């Protein structure tokens, strides 16, 4: 029983824009925007695979802007054996192959900015070990993102490859890069996938129409059982 997604608030917005003040740029739905979100940037959420995909992705789509949201702490797993943060470790590994002006580490952002980021996203990457599903995946789908996700449980509970998103092997960074690039190239033909992604969340995870009523039903049932005892 999921906590629920407020799909009235988390919804597509064709007029959305997001400003990156440090970079001095503003981005909207017409730009090539690749988004990645995690509470913290770490392997449990596929950060290493995502970073390894970026050199090829930017060769295929040199105009793409990569927006990365997440902190440098560790929520799950451990820090790199070499010390420091996973962001530092991955920049040390692939940073020399990247155009620094195309990759933007935003840290943790206010919720309103996070929603705008999803609304302007051309394609959203979500990767995870077989582990607890992130709210961010369902929110990205509710916002109408084209999601390229890892073919792992529990992602496969909500994404059907080619119907409401795309699935790739968790550790195959080349496949990830190519699928992200293809989603950008085909962006104007992917409206059905965007719509299906949102409908999946509205039908199964909407807070007011689905999840909250089920939660209340459960509480009433438990109270009734206790009263009967």
Image (cartoon, helix red, strand yellow):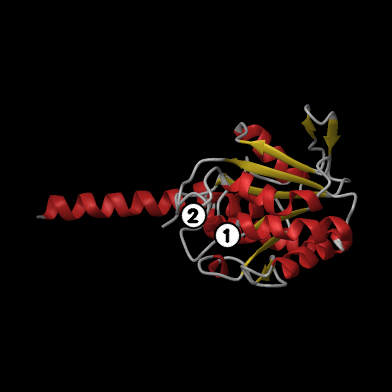
Residue 192 lies, in percent from the top left, at 78, 64
Tag of residue 116: none
- CA gap, disc 1 to disc 2? 8 Å
Residue at 73% x, 44% y is 67
Residue at 69% x, 39% y is 105
Q: Nearer the viewer, residue 76 or 228?
A: 76
Residue 190 visible, this orientation: no
For residue 151, side relative to residue 212 (left or right): right
Tag of residue 203: 1
For residue 219, side relative to residue 107 (left or right): left
Instruction: Determine the secondary structure under disc 1.
Output: helix
For residue 73, side relative to residue 50 (left or right): left
Q: Bin the neighbour count of mark 2 within 10 Å (Cα to Cα): few under 14, some 14-19, many 20 and up.
A: some
Q: Are marks 1 and 2 in contact (CB under 8 Å)?
A: yes
Residue 171 lies, in percent from the top left, at 63, 68
- Above or below: residue 220 compared with residue 174: above
- Above or below: residue 50 compared with residue 117: below
- Above or below: residue 45 compared with residue 20: below
Instruction: Determine the secondary structure under disc 2.
Output: helix
Residue 57 lies, in percent from the top left, at 81, 59
Q: Nearer the viewer, residue 8 or 147?
A: 147
Residue 144 lies, in percent from the top left, at 71, 53
Residue lying furthest front in this view? Answer: 82
Residue 178 visible, this orientation: yes
Write down the quadrant of residue 2 in the picture. bottom left
Q: Nearer the viewer, residue 47 or 11?
A: 47
Q: Which residue is mark 2?
A: 210
């Amino acid at each position: 029983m999921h906590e629920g997604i407020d799909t009235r608030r988390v919804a597509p917005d064709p007029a959305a824009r997001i400003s990156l003040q440090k970079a001095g740029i503003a981005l909207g739905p017409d730009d090539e925007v690749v988004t990645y979100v995690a509470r913290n940037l770490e392997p449990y959420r596929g950060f290493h695979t995502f970073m390894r995909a970026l050199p090829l992705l930017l060769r295929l789509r040199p105009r793409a802007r990569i927006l990365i949201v997440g902190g440098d702490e560790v929520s799950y797993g451990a820090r790199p054996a070499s010390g420091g943060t996973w962001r530092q470790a991955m920049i040390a590994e692939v940073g020399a192959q990247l155009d620094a002006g195309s990759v933007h580490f935003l840290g943790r952002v206010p919720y309103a900015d996070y929603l705008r980021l999803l609304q302007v996203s051309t394609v959203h990457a979500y990767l995870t070990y077989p582990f607890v599903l992130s709210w961010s995946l369902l929110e990205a789908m509710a916002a109408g993102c084209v999601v390229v996700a890892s073919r792992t449980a529990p992602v496969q509970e909500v994404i059907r490859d080619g119907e409401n998103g795309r699935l790739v092997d968790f550790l195959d960074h080349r496949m990830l890069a190519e699928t992200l690039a293809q989603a950008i190239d085909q962006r104007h033909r992917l409206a059905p996938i965007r719509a299906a992604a949102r409908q999946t969340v509205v039908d199964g995870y909407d807070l007011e129409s689905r999840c909250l009523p089920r939660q209340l039903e459960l509480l009433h049932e438990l109270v009734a059982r206790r009263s009967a005892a």
